Image: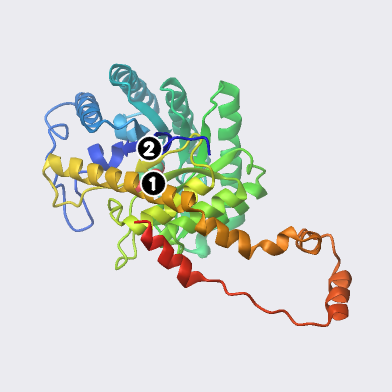
Amino acid sequence: RGKRMEDHLRFAVCYWHSFVWTGLDPFGGETFLRPWFTGGSPMELAVRKAEAAFDFLSRLGVPYYCFHDRDVAPEGATPRESLSNFRHMVEHLAAHQQRTGIKLLWGTANLFSHRRYMAGAATNPDPEVFAMAATQVKAAIDATLQLGGENYVLWGGREGYETLLNTDLRQELDQLGRFLNLVVDYKHRIGFTGTILLEPKPREPTKHQYDFDVATVYGFLKRYGLEKEVKVNIEANHATLSGHSFEHEIALAQALGIFGSLDMNRGDPQLGWDTDQFPNNLPETAIALYSVLQGGGFTTGGLNFDAKVRRQSIDPTDLFHGHVGAMDLCARALLVAARMIEDDRLAKAVRERYAGWRTSFGRDALEGRLSLEALSERVLSRNEDVTPVSGRQEALENLVNRYI
Ligand code: ASO
């Protein structure tokens, strides 16, 4: 639809998995001994990390990257020191972007790692924590604007609860709604024209995450009057953890008018948590990207590889293999998705299935212009039962495999 294939290759590398994560898991410590993890002050290490990151991004030839405030600059001893560290590093990032031509797909603030956020950030009962979260988000939006970022993401890592016995659910949801309204208000006041994206995730880290899935987020946005202001960043592994498929979440967001951007990765079907593996399944990815193309592709969003090499893959070249393989897979999946669209057999099957919409009775009935009485009168005057039409699922699924 007026777009070239290259327009969809809006690939981004995430700072946190590639340059920050040390290989630490609940059972063991660091496994990646990167040169920017030790041997200098925290700010010296942040500078070295940014150099290594842009060296990697340039060699990979990727157009975009994404970061959290705390990925790029260390937390200071005080809020002012943290802000000054961050601002200093944003200058470095600006210079690297200028030199390499690499752009920022989105910025964000880490409101989940520090202990102050253990009981939530925007939903925390302590107003000082709420204010601290606001301080971080303000600085991160300022940085995103300064760096020409195309979107700003909020993933509510700790916005949820473990037990209702210490939780006022209504109050916490209201706080989250107010916080997001403050963010949207600020965005307009400073002239940030990028898209604000909320990222749904269920079950982890808190048991009951408020932004469980796309449907939940839409209900939340409606309630707080934000459905025209905020879109979603959908992650593959978050979709499957909520019991949905990735393409379901994409298609639903498009249907509701809140589709924004994607975090590409893959969960492990045997494991019930967020494993953030590189996507490596062609049919699965093709069907997801088919949904994206059907909805018209991306406007400000893209495909951020929110994926990490496993902790044994300690050789720096493993990071290239992970990204090269995943980008190659997504490029191939886009070609498969384009073939699914061009062939027209799938679209034709859908057109035929919804043929009833194109009759005058169909439009009146399905667009809600006929009352229950009128519908009932029609059925009783025709006095014929309905003959069901085959859904043809098997034929269509077989067809998809032939495009690969
Ligand atoms: C890390 C999470 C990821 C999210 C990012 C932004 O793993 O899903 O996109 O933070 O906060």
Mark 1 touches mark 2? (CB < 8 Å):
yes
Q: Quadrant of the C terminus?
A: bottom left
Q: What's the CA distance linking mark 1 and mark 2?
A: 9 Å
Is residue 296 left or right of 108 when viewed as pictured?
A: right
Percent of width and height locating residue 206: 42, 57
Q: Respond yes or no on whether mark 2 lies under 8 Å from ligand 1.
A: no
Percent of width and height locating residue 132: 46, 35
- Answer yes or no: is residue 171 visible: no
Q: Earlier in the sequence, mark 1 or mark 2?
A: 2
The vertical placement of 344 against 370, above or below, is above
- Answer yes or no: is residue 278 visible: yes
Percent of width and height locating residue 365: 79, 64
Indicate the secondary structure of the residue bearing disc 2. loop
Is residue 102 left or right of 131 when viewed as pictured?
A: left
Along the line of sight, which residue is nearer the eye, 383 or 181? 383
Along the line of sight, which residue is nearer the eye, 366 or 23? 366
Indicate the secondary structure of the residue bearing disc 1. helix
**Residue lying at 44% horizontally and 23% vertically, measured from the top left:** 148
The vertical placement of 82 against 21, above or below, is above
Q: Residue beneath label 2, please?
A: 9
Q: Which mark is residue 334?
A: 1
Q: Which residue type carries mark 2?
A: Leu
